Image: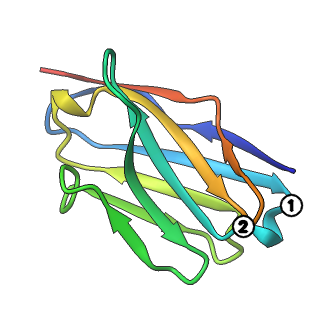
Amino acid sequence: QVQLVESGGGLVQTGGSLRLSCAASGGVSSIIVMGWHRQAPGKQRELVAHITRGGVTNYADSVKGRFTISRTITYRTIYLQMNSTKPEDTAVYYCHVQDPWREYWGQGTQVTVSS
C-alpha cells in the first residue's frame, strides 16, 4: 500500500508560479512512476506530467515549457513547478502513483489561476 499526501495548491494570478508537492509513504520501493493529473470542471481527468524512477519525464503538450516535474533522490516526493500559469490551468490536481500491481491517487489539491 502507498499513501500520498499532496500540498501546495492555491490561488495564483495569470503568469504567476506555484509549486505542488506529493509525498509518498508505505510501499514506495515498488513504485514505477509518479506523476500529476488534473481535472477541470466538466472535463475528463488528464495527464499533466509524470516522472519514472529513472528520471524520465513526460509532459502534456499544454504544459511543456511552463511546468517542470522533479523528484527527490529517494523517489518518495515529487514536485510540480508551475510557471507562466494560465486560467486554463485551473483544476484539481491529483498525485498519481503506479506500482506493478495497481495505481494510487491522492486526494487532490485545487489550483485556481485568476485572469
Q: State the separation of the CA atoms marked 2 and 1.
A: 8 Å
Query: Is residue 90 placed above or below 49 in the rendered structure?
Result: above
Q: Which residue is mark 2?
A: 31
Which residue extends farthest front?
A: 101
The answer to which image quadrant residue 108 occupies is top right
**Point 69% across, 46% down: residue:** 104
Q: Position of residue 14 (x, y in %)?
A: 15, 31
Q: Position of residue 54 (x, y in %)?
A: 56, 84
The three-letter code of the residue at mark 1 reads Gly
Characterize the local packing of mark 2: few (<14), some (14-19) or many (20 or more) Cα atoms within 10 angstroms: many
Q: Quick check: 18 left or right of 32?
A: left
Q: Are marks 2 and 1 in contact (CB under 8 Å)?
A: yes
| Number of disc labels | 2
Q: Quick check: 19 left or right of 64?
A: right
Q: Quick check: 78 left or right of 63?
A: right
Q: Which residue is mark 1?
A: 27
**Point 65% across, 70% down: residue:** 32
The three-letter code of the residue at mark 2 reads Ile
Q: Quick check: 113 left or right of 8?
A: left
**Quadrant assignment for the C terminus:** top left
Query: Is residue 55 placed above or below 9 in the rendered structure?
Result: below
The answer to which image quadrant residue 18 occupies is top left
**Point 87% across, 51% down: residue:** 1
Q: Nearer the viewer, residue 104 or 106?
A: 104
Q: Position of residue 91 (x, y in %)?
A: 36, 26
The numbered dot on residue 79 is none
Which residue extends farthest bottom?
A: 54
Characterize the local packing of mark 1: few (<14), some (14-19) or many (20 or more) Cα atoms within 10 angstroms: few
